Image (cartoon, grey):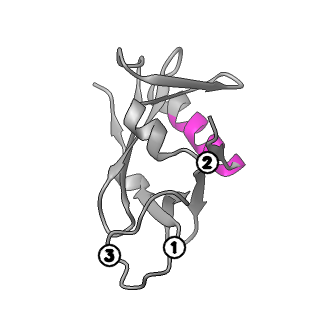
Amino acid sequence: MSITFSATAEAFMRRMVRIGGGGAAGFRLEVSPGGCSGLAAQFDVEPEPRPDDVVLEANGLRLFMSQESRQLLEGATVDFVDTRTDSGFSILAPNAAKACASSATQVPAVATMEIARIRHAQ
């Protein structure tokens, strides 16, 4: 299993879990094929994993994702960007095909998820 999370991405996920769930809650990251980037993604804080989830744990942080998301993220690097003009996750997935590319050159797909799209578990 090879997914790389930058220190800033991990810090953001930890902060979201602490604010939105606490305890045994985890950070859900869902990725599916689609969009011009080759990936469509969303994220959330949830109290527990779903029955068929893959659960990754690192230093007390629990990350929940579907099997499909796990496969799509193989070899990917997940980063978090927070600037004056942009804030959100960026996923560099070398194995995902760009759906809207007009060139025959294979370019790694990048999916960006804005923090405004965060949903909290009810």
Looking at numbered disc 2 in the image, what kind of residue is underneath it? Answer: Ala
Callout 3 secondary element: loop
User: Residue placed at 52% from the left, 23% from the top?
Assistant: 55
Q: CA distance from mark 1 to mark 2?
A: 23 Å
Mark 1 vs mark 2: which is more N-terminal? 2
Q: What residue does disc 2 label?
A: 9
Looking at numbered disc 3 in the image, what kind of residue is underneath it? Answer: Cys
Name the dominant secondary structure of the magenta segment.
Answer: helix
Looking at numbered disc 1 in the image, what kind of residue is underneath it? Answer: Val
Quadrant of the rendering where the C terminus is positioned: top left
Q: Is residue 64 above or below residue 73?
A: above
Q: Is residue 36 left or right of residue 80?
A: left
- Given this view, does label 1 or label 2 mark the residue nearer the observer? 1
- Given this view, does label 2 or label 3 mark the residue nearer the observer? 3
Q: What residue does disc 1 label?
A: 107
The location of residue 46, given as percent across then percent down, is 40, 25
**Which residue extends farthest front?**
104
User: Magenta segment range?
Assistant: 7-16
Q: Is residue 82 above or below residue 106?
A: above
Mark 2 vs mark 3: which is more N-terminal? 2
Callout 1 secondary element: loop
The location of residue 97, given as percent across then percent down, is 42, 64
Closer-to-camera residue (25/105): 105
